[in-house]
Structure formats: structure tokens, C-alpha cells
Image: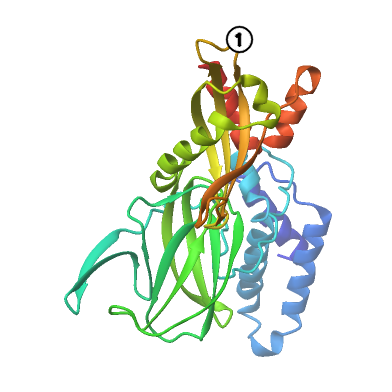
Amino acid sequence: MDRDQWLNHLKERADQSIFHDVVFSPEMEEKVRRTVERERQKKAYFSAKKWPLWSGVTAAVLLLAVLGTVYPAIFSGEHGSMSPEPPTEKPWLPGTVAAPPDLWKPSPRTEERHDNQTFSYLGEKPVRIITDETGLYEDQTQKVVWLLDGSFEREVELVAYSTDGKRLSLGKYEVAGPLYDAKGHFPSGIVLPEPGVWKIQVLSGGEHFGQVFVQVQKGIAPANRDWILSLVKSYLQTAGGDLAWLGSDRQVEVELIGVEAPVAEQRRVYAWVKITGGANEASPGLSCPMVLDILYGPAPSGGSGYRVVGHRIPADGKMYRSSLEEMFPEKYLRRLDEMQKR
């Protein structure tokens, strides 16, 4: 049997298999012929009796390899056409999120004793963190002490990854000496913008050193809620400017929508505020969204502390919505809309 007859016979057998709907193009056919010809030229390595068997195996393998490029289309119902090539994946880098990591879970909290001192932490060696047991809350800085073990550089870098692939650089830090049972430690503040599970990776010398998984919660941290509410209410009792018309006898209600605390000394508060006048006040009152800024610094009466340094309310009429969109980040604006529907 010559090459063309043998090739036709191979195609007929393929037509009787799962490849019956696959188009065997002239280009594919020519590719098989060229391969067979190259193998024939190597006949010095094979006996004449073994050549037909060897060439048959070679061509069959090549045919299956070529048909393999369209094999997925057979099962998807797209017979007779070749599927597009899958996109080329980028090389893996430490911390890269190649797909939504649905299996991420917060690192468990562990309590231990060292030198007669009890401490609790999240994660496991070589990277552990000590933080408030109430956990992390969106947009609000949280103090963290990092415990490192193993071999690491004097300076390390923190990088955070969300489950949807968002990457945030959290800065570089100089590692200090031992703490508890760890070889090295350093303090940091962490602010993560969205609720959910985040992976925080430690890089040493630009390479992956370790990681810890944290749960970021929606809403306002207990450490912020009570004192912010008290401070805002006190401010609104006497605030002047565009609130002066409310009079001096005021009843104030505040519903917090969100808090941004990029650093310990600063807060931005998003709230719904309701202010009504007392029995002797003729004012109809005020009920609207408001943004208030809080800073830590010297107080007018002496000493230092947090104080409200300003507020904003949306414009009236046709400018109401556009001014509101300028004041509120998108996610807090959505929560405001949801609150108003209740």
C-alpha cells in the first residue's frame, strides 16, 4: 500500500470514530505527508520490513495531535470548525491570583504562652500577626504586629490580594528584633477597602516569604462607632454656618453609613443626620445625608484629641443627586440608597 492509499485508509478509519465531523483540511493532509517523507529519509536506521509499521505509527500520532486541536469542539457541539486557541497565561508570580480563590479562609486564631506571657495571633509560621480580636473593618486602619520566623531580609514588603484579584501595596517595613517566640517583628497599620477574605503576603528580598489570610468585615469597627457617634452628635448640637438656622435647642439623631480611617489621626464619616428644633424653636428641622471630617490634634481648650473640623451637606433641587455623588464613594452611596428604601 502506497502512502496516499494508506493515508486515505487512515482518514476513513477516523471518519468511523468520534472524529467523523472534523474537517481534515488539505493543509493537515500535507503536513502528514511531509512528516512521513522525513521519516522515510531516515530509513538507514530501520530495516525495510519495519518501515511501514514505523511510518504508520508516526503518521497516526501526528494525525491525532492535529485532530486534538479541534477535539474540544466535538463535545461542545461546534462540529466542523476549530476552536480558538486559549489565551496565553501569564507566568506565575508569588501572590498572583489566577482565578477567584473560593477556598480562601481566614487564618485561625491561636493562643500560646511564652516566658509566662499569653498572646494570641492569626496565621502560622513563618508569618503570624497580632491584632485586635474584633478583627479588621473596611476602610478603617487597624494596628497589627507582625511576627516573622526563618531567614528574612532587614526590610520586608507587604502586598494584599482580594478574592477578585485586586492587588494593593501596603508598604515596606524594617524588621526589629525578637518578640515572644518569633525571631523578628514589626508594627504596621493596615487599611483594606472591601469586605471579604484578603491574603496579605510578605515579600523578603522581592521574593515570597509567607502569608496570612484575614477577614475584612463590612461596617464600622466597634473601636470607632461609639466615640464617633458621641463626637458627631456633640458637634451638631452647636454647629453654625449653614446649620445656624436650626437654632440653639436641637435634638440630634445620627445613623452612620460608613467610616474611612486611612490613618489613626483622621476619620471621614458618612452619615444620615436628622436635626429637629426644641419646643420653643420655629425651625422645621433638617434630615439629610452628611459628610463630616474628624482630625486628631491640639484642642482649642488645651490638650489634644479628636474633633470635627467640618461638614458637608448636598445641594438642593436639581443639584442634589450630582452633589451627593461627589460627596459619597459609590459603595456608601449604594448603602445610602438602600437605607432610604427601608
Nearest the viewer among 105 and 63 is: 105
Q: What residue type is labelled 1?
A: Ala
- Establish if 128 lies above or below 178: above
- Establish if 214 lies above or below 19: below
Circle 1: element type: loop
- Establish if 215 lies above or below 90: above
Look at 60% across and 9% down and name the residue there.
Answer: 282
Q: Residue 4: horizontal and vertical position, in percent?
A: 77, 61
Look at 57% across and 12% down and name the residue there.
Answer: 281
Look at 36% across and 57% down and name the residue there.
Answer: 132
Nearest the viewer among 316 and 217 is: 316
Q: Can residue 320 be seen in this view?
A: yes
User: For this view, does 59 lie left or right of residue 270?
Assistant: right
Q: Residue 320: horizontal and vertical position, in percent?
A: 74, 23
Q: How many labels does the image show?
A: 1
Q: Residue 124: horizontal and vertical position, in percent?
A: 33, 69
Q: How crowded is mark 1: few (under 14 residues within 10 Å), some or many (20 or more)?
A: few
Its colouring scheme is rainbow
Look at 56% across and 59% down and name the residue there.
Answer: 97
User: For this view, does 28 lie left or right of residue 229?
Assistant: right
Nearest the viewer among 182 and 55 is: 182
User: For this view, does 25 lie left or right of residue 95?
Assistant: right
Residue at mark 1: 282
Nearest the viewer among 42 and 313 is: 313
Outermost residue on the left side: it is: 116
